[in-house]
């Protein structure tokens, strides 16, 4: 509810530094008439003043307009709108409460579905199971190196968890129980890896690196054995090096003589290799 003069004051504005500029009452009246002609507002005179009603408010605000307010229909009058406005607010509040309740019910249903979903069955290993025995082998190796080792949350829980990892190593990684047991024992005897392999999960992660190091160690051990064998071989007699047909023992059968000659050639080849390494 507003008068034309008050609307003019409300529409006042500052233009530059000249102070407040107010449109005239006639200008406001012409603008209101244009809005009425375009079906945008309705004007209703009362004894207390003029009531200006914005038509198609829902359309301007993004709401669905009632059927009677769609273009081409007769708009409701201001008194009807004022009468229906409280009811509209009540309905809107009821709809909001209903939507909130529906959202809450949907969340609760989702939570109940999650709680009632079947849980994954936990595998329990017996002491006679191969995965459990492998886990126990690792446990004994760790305790031999560190008797104060603390299992979390408990020793039995750790063994069950380690046994499951050992099963995965056999089923998915295609490791045999003998291979896993060998790597476990080797790691716990190695000065470096015994401090790093403290669980079956770590053993599985580092398994390939452990295999490479085990092979390198075996090759080094083989070289040491060959070198020791070579050092224990003394000077070879000239008759052994230059043995000819006349010097051969006639008591040997042809097969025995052939075998002896093959062994003699092996020894000479090994000695030649040793002499070449020593000279270099």
Image (cartoon, rainbow, N blue to C red):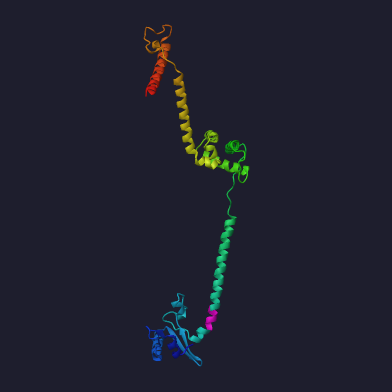
Image spot of residue 108 (x, y percent): 58, 62
Image spot of residue 273 (x, y percent): 39, 21
Magenta-span inclusion, residue 87: yes
60 versus 191 height, above or below: below
Foreground residue, 142 or 96?
Answer: 142
State left or right for residue 38 relative to residue 186: left
Snapshot quadrant of residue 62: bottom left
Tell me the residue at 53%/84% (across/down).
83
Image spot of residue 144 (x, y percent): 60, 35
Range of residues picked out in magenta: 83-88
Farthest residue to the bottom: give it: 47
Foreground residue, 222 or 249?
Answer: 222
Snapshot quadrant of residue 157: top right
Magenta-span inclusion, residue 162: no
64 versus 171 height, above or below: below
Instruction: Tell me the quadrant of the picture where the C terminus can be found.
Output: top left
State left or right for residue 18 relative to residue 102: left
Magenta region's main secondary structure? helix
Tell me the residue at 39%/10% (across/down).
239
41 versus 274 height, above or below: below
């Amino acid at each position: 509810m507003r008068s034309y003069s008050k609307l003019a004051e409300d529409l006042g504005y500052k233009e530059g530094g000249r102070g407040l500029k107010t449109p005239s009452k006639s200008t406001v009246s012409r603008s209101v008439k244009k809005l009425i002609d375009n079906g945008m507002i309705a004007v209703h005179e009362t004894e207390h003043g003029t009531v200006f009603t914005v038509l198609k408010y829902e359309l301007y605000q993004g709401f669905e307009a009632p059927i009677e307010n769609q273009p081409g229909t007769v708009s409701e009058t201001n008194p009807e709108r004022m009468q229906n406005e409280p009811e509209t607010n009540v309905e809107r509040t009821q709809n909001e409460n209903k939507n909130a309740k529906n959202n809450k019910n949907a969340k609760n249903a989702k939570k109940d579905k999650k709680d009632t979903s079947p849980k994954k069955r936990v595998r329990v290993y017996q002491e006679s199971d191969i995965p459990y025995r492998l886990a126990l082998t690792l446990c004994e190796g760790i305790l031999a190196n560190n008797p104060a080792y603390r299992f979390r949350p408990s020793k039995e829980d750790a063994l069950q968890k380690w046994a499951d990892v050992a099963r995965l190593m056999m089923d998915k990684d295609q490791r045999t129980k003998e291979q896993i047991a060998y790597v476990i024992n080797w790691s716990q005897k190695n000065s470096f890896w015994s401090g790093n392999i403290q669980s079956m999960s770590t053993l599985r992660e580092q398994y390939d690196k452990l295999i490479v190091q085990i092979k390198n160690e075996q090759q080094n051990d083989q070289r040491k054995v060959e070198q020791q064998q070579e050092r224990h071989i003394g000077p070879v007699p000239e008759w052994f090096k230059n043995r000819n047909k006349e010097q051969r023992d006639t008591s040997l059968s042809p097969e025995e003589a052939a075998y002896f000659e093959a062994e003699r050639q092996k020894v000479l080849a090994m000695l030649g290799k040793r002499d070449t390494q020593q000279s270099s």
